[in-house]
Image (spheres, grey):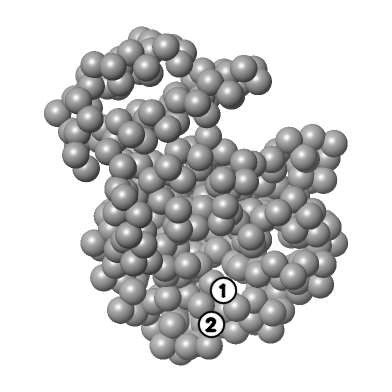
Amino acid sequence: MALSIAPMLDRTDRHFRFLLRLLSHRVELYTEMVVCDALLSRNGNRIVDFDPREKPLILQLAGSDPGKLGRCAELAEARGYDGINLNVGCPSDRVQRGRFGACLMKTPELVAECVSAMQARTRLPVSVKCRIGVDELDRYQDLARFVAIVAEGGCRIFIIHARKAWLKGLSAKENRVVPPLRYDYVYRLKRDFPQYTVILNGGIADLEQARLQLQWVDGVMIGRAVYQNPYLLAHADAWFYQDAHPIPSREQVLAAYVPYVAAQLQQGVRWSLVARHLMGLYHGQPVARKWRRYLTEASGVAALESWLAQAPFARP
């Protein structure tokens, strides 16, 4: 996939993914990080449930036990996911305590074993999302060694967040912005490993910047920028996939989201869980502040319909 949306905790849940599908049919979506033990619990089916209209959809897993990851991979295929991604990039303290995420970059042999175990249980493509380095292992040679060893386990798709991670001294939020971006590491990785799919992640602010990166890598992953401004994806299919489907206005997107909201509320989902993802729909528009205030004070499908009744159906 030329363009994908990064897995983000408390962001890329099923409600946000459905909203994004109203803007793009082709961009690849990822779930929030799902811990293996949670998926294998009796609540696992609820955790990984999704609407078929969200596809193509990749399940991101967190874990370091090859056996458990293999069982999770099998479950992912049975549930209808289009791929599996192993998180080797999250630096949070909670993730480190579980012995997964970015700390696994220090044990590439274990990551290779995990990938091999997953591929033995599924026909789905298995990818790894990692950083360019971790702690003192931050030379390009360290990254290249990590990729070479993990590839021996069968991985052919590497999503690289172009910042190193500090496991101590920086919070997870600070790790997203403080370590400098090193796109040159990712470009060099693609040159040195042309046989693998290399996808760049980190600091991409818009579609134009994403498209420029395709000169050096196979794909680009965007994260926070899309959450802050979902409508950024309105032109993605045309720009990246030559898909000429009509580009909807913001109001048309909202109107299409209303029946989904109504169905979720009927199932007992809280209003805040479906409405919060709409906050950025008018990002950068003159009515943006008014919209956010309206959404905070209002509730229910009737409120969305009232907004639509008053709003001009602006051209995209």
| Left-right relation of 9 to 34 | left
Q: Which mark is residue 224?
A: none
Out of 144 and 97, give the one closest to the viewer: 144
Horizontal arrangement in the rendering, residue 85 relative to residue 20 (left or right): right
Mark 2 touches mark 1? (CB < 8 Å): yes
First-in-chain label (2 vs 1): 1
Tell me the kind of residue under disc 2: Tyr
Please name the residue that numbered disc 2 is placed on.
196
User: Where on the picture, by quarter, is residue 74?
Assistant: bottom right
Residue drawn at point x = 53 percent, y = 34 percent: 15
| Visible residue check, residue 208 | yes
Residue density around tag 1, few if under 14, some if 14–19, many if 20 or more, within 10 Å? many
Q: Position of residue 184 (x, y in %)?
A: 33, 77
Q: Which residue is mark 1?
A: 157
Q: Gap between marks 2 and 1, in whole Å?
A: 6 Å
What residue is rendered at 35% in x and 42% in y?
Answer: 230
